[in-house]
Image (cartoon, grey):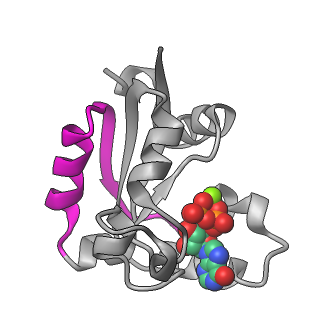
Amino acid sequence: MSTRTFIMIKPDGVKNKHVGDILARIEKEGFKILGLKYLKLSLEDAKQFYKVHAARPFYNDLCGYMSSGPIVAAALERDNAVLHWRDVIGATDPKEAKAETIRALYAESKEANAVHGSDSDDNAALEISFFFKGNELF
Ligand code: IDP
Ligand code: MG
């Protein structure tokens, strides 16, 4: 069944010129791009987006980092979209990510780890609505 996920190419992925490689991988993996934006998050946007992590020690650094430069945000559709994208990106820490995953290939560090991916269908829906209006998805 076709389902949705939300992904970002984080500031390090943009800065290190991996946007084209990552968008090509998205298409190669069979995802349909429903929505796509290039933007810079404000610190407030980043705090709101990552509020589930507010109690974690890395929260302030993470929000500062995520608002430090432009990102790419995308809503994607595919069978088993959330889990498939999590498999494609690999573990949070690139040192633990399997070979050929996006984080193994492109991440700088556990924080600057190239890409985001939703962790559930419910969060995918919330995260897509954070970035996209209904008429911006095709
Ligand atoms: P995920 O992105 O693999 O789902 P989460 O645990 O949801 O990982 O954490 C969200 C983001 O917070 C990570 O992608 C990473 O950028 C950052 N992060 C997570 N754990 C750490 C840490 O221990 N140190 C620094 N940054 C972290
Ligand atoms: Mg997560």
Left or right: 105 in relation to 110? left
Report the residue at 33% width, 34% height from top.
35
How many marks on residues? 0
> As rendered, which of 102 and 134 lies closer to the eye?
102
| Place of residue 94 in the rendered image (x, y in percent of width and height, measured from the top left) | 45, 77
Judged from this view, the residue extending furthest toward the right is 55
Q: Is residue 39 magenta?
A: yes
Left or right: 29 in relation to 83? left
Q: Which residues are magenta?
A: 17-42
User: Can I make out residue 78 in this image?
Assistant: yes
Report the residue at 46% width, 85% height from top.
109
Look at the image and tell me in which quarter the C terminus lies.
Answer: top left
Report the residue at 17% width, 73% height from top.
17
> As rendered, which of 100 and 17 lies closer to the eye?
100
Q: Is residue 99 magenta?
A: no
Left or right: 93 in relation to 23? right
